[in-house]
Amino acid sequence: MASFSYRAISNQGKTVDGSISADRIELASRELRSQGLTLLSLEPASGGAVARADSGGRAAGSDDVLALTRELSVLLRAGLPIDRALKVMIDMSAQERMRGLLNELLASVKSGKGLSQALAAYPREFDNFYVNMVRSGEASGHLDQVLTRLAEYLTNAKTVRSGVISALIYPAILLTVALISIAAMLGFVVPQFETLFADMGDALPALTRMVIAGGDFVAAYGWLLVMLVAAAVILVRNWLRSPHGRAEFDRRLLDLPMLGAVVFKFEVAKFARTVGTLLGNGVSLLQSIAIAVETVDNTRIKEALSVLEPAVKRGQRVSVALDETGVFSPLVIQMARVGEESGSLDQMMTELAQVYDEEVQAGIKRSLALLEPVLILTMAAFIAMIIIAILMGIMSVNNLAI
């Protein structure tokens, strides 16, 4: 294990010097960044070249953008100019892809472009929301503060998204195991008893005959079932990609008991958080709404929200336009109305997002609390039916023998 010396800036903007032990330079860098430090330099304690990790050309993901935003905000708060901050980040980047991206941003900034203009050339990494946040920071002269708020926004969005995904992992695994178990019982276990029941004919109970027929079909045409399932998945995916299919799916999704309310709150929370963040950083209401609507994935909610921009242009209040859609809950309308009347629409939208984020987490937990027992009981019922059918067949054989 090697020892590395580092100089970094803490989240409070203080310079920190120290050393750390790690097997590789990238592990040392990762550990220091996990402690909330923004590296200025990192090198072996005995001197020498610094080895770097190579991402193999991997495209920058949401985690990379979050790390870039957080570190750039710390460097700017420490008093570094934007070009010097980007140069430090290039020197300390452990990924080839990120170094290339940062180099291109630095070249654009040095050529006289603003950071927001440089970021706009990479829409895959930095969407309209991100670019407009940076533009507002440049216009106000508080880019470091805006980047800090942007990092908080991205962190919160990541936390909510990760919570939803993590909550769905166990039910997905449970459903997969259930399907594999039932297929294995029908395809491999049930056929073992066929020779025992071969001469029984119609004397076998109806349930036993049905299970044996199912086992024969799975054993003989299992490959066909797999192909049919794959074809169904492709057809459904293509249907969802069509405007009509996507709209129909989103409509039915919102109409589902329990799950529909969770999806609604999740989408509205994204919209409200984006509007609140943009308004709080000086972006105009019209532009904030236009950007926030694009963050919504559900087409039914997106269509309802699309009336806001023309309504605001006509001079209509946001709360009134929301109420006229007939889609949004009284809480959404009242929070918007209070924000407009008090002149703090940005704060009310942020509060609404926080309330709905908490309700989304609680709704997911309640849904999973019901879904998991249902999956377990359904799997148990199928397996129990197969076992009972085999036992009934064995009892029938014994009765005939007597």
Image: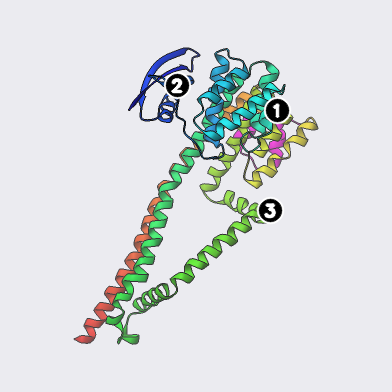
Q: Position of residue 234 (x, y in %)?
A: 57, 60
| 327 magenta-colored | yes
Amino acid identity at mark 1: Gln
Say few, some or many: other residues with alpha carbon within 10 Å of mark 2 (under 14 / 14 to 19 / 20 or more).
many
The numbered mark, 2 or 3, whose residue comes first in the sequence reads: 2
The numbered mark, 2 or 1, whose residue comes first in the sequence reads: 2
Q: Which residue is mark 2?
A: 42
Amino acid identity at mark 2: Leu
Report the disc number at residue 117. Answer: 1
Q: Position of residue 81 (x, y in %)?
A: 61, 15
Closer to the camera: disc 2 or disc 3? Answer: 2
Q: What residue is shown at x 30% (from left), y 69% (from top)?
A: 387
Amino acid identity at mark 3: Pro
* Residue 356 visible in image: no
Q: Which residue is mark 3?
A: 243
Q: What residue is shown at x 63% (from left), y 58% (from top)?
A: 239
* Residue 21 visible in image: yes
In what element is the residue under mark 2? strand
Q: What residue is shown at x 43% (from left), y 52% (from top)?
A: 172
